[in-house]
Amino acid sequence: MNRPVVVGVDGSPSSLTAAEHAARAAVARSRPLRLVHGYLHPLGYGVPLNPYDLGVPAPTGESRAMLERVAAELTGRHPTLEVAVRQVAGGPAATLVEESRHADLVVVGSRGVGGFAGLLLGSVSAQVAQHGHCPVLVVRPAEQPIPVQAPVLVGVDGSAPADVAVRLAAEEAVRRDATLVLAHVHRAVPGGTDPHDAAGPAESAELLAGVAARVRAAHPVLTVAERPVPGDSPEQALIAASGEAVLVVVGSRGRGGFAGLLLGSVSQALVQHAHCPVLVAHPPEPAA
């Protein structure tokens, strides 16, 4: 099953940036690209107010023209790309979460400014990142150029979801011919009741060495760097490190700040504040 790369497009600058990222991802993966427009307001605006009219409004010609224009521009820049467009009578977040069930990757843009400042729980990008059924890439127009030859950065914490993130990050680094940086944030002074929270420099180095060995065995040509990072806040440490990366990859759940992918977790903090695109590593669901 040739799962597509799916991107939400509504004509806004952030969605056009997302569409370009999605096109590049589709070409790199040899996948088709699907441009999706969920044309009902997430709170239901646009649904008929007459209770006796149970239908929903049809898509507009204007939105169809917008999608076709974006598709034409993308194929002009990427001639080998196969592009399809789709309009769905649904809110944008719900539409993309549903599309993610049958996608290889979903790409969303964020309208946040200043490193996603002001991105509220319930926004389209936050909802899709939290509830997607496949990997979700969150991008926004860059405020400053991403460093040339920047590495792919992935957070490591020893959990199974973090292992999924490492696998996806390694694949991305290979596609981009980039270095993969494995980062683990440990306490400068070990302490706490949770053994993971108590990890110090030695435990961090041991964890990273084990993960790096597995990655090198799977990808012998990939350059892998191990970065133990002292600090009491995994969120702030990885946000700072993202300023030197082309992409940061995080698990959707895990230990030591990854649990539950709730607002305030490492994953959600990076989705809101990272200085580069963020790939949230939901494992794809089996093909139906």
Image: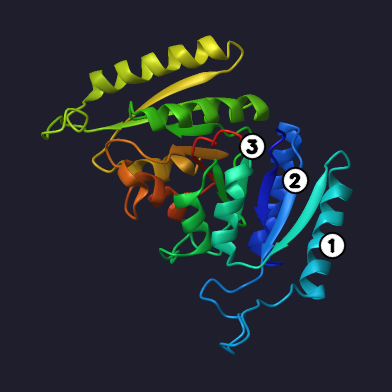
Q: Which residue is mark 1?
A: 69
As drawn, 13 above or below 277:
below
Judge whether residue 245 can be spotted in this image.
Answer: no
Q: CA distance from mark 2 to mark 3?
A: 26 Å
Location of residue 116 with respect to 84 vertically, above or below: below
The quarter of the image holding the N terminus is: top right
User: Horizontal and vertical percent for residue 138?
Assistant: 55, 50
- The secondary structure type at the circle numbered 1 is helix
Q: Foreground mark, 1 or 3?
A: 1
Instruction: Report the Cα–Cα distance between label 1 and label 3.
Output: 30 Å
Label 2's element?
strand
Residue with the mark numbered 3: 148
Tell me which numbered mark, 2 or 3, is placed earlier along the sequence: 2
Position of residue 207 in the picture relative to residue 61 (left or right): left
Pointer 1 local density, CA inside 10 Å: few below 14, some 14–19, many at least 20: few
Q: Is residue 159 above or below residue 125?
A: above
Density class for disc 2 (Cα within 10 Å; few <14, some 14-19, many ≥20) is: many
Type of the residue with mark 3: Val
Q: In the structure shown, which secondary structural element does the residue marked by tag 3 occupy? A: loop
Q: How is the image coloured?
A: rainbow
Q: Please provide percent x and percent y for residue 96.
A: 59, 55
Instruction: Name the outermost residue toward the front.
Output: 52
Q: Position of residue 224 (x, y in %)?
A: 51, 19
Q: Quadrant of the C terminus?
A: top right
In three-dimensional space, the C-alpha distance between marks 1 and 2, rounded to whole angstroms, equals 14 Å
Q: Amino acid at mark 1?
A: Arg
Q: Which residue is mark 2?
A: 33
Q: Name which of mark 1 and mark 2 comes first in the sequence.
A: 2
Sequence-earlier tag: 1 or 3: 1
Residue shown at 55%/53% (left/top)? 97
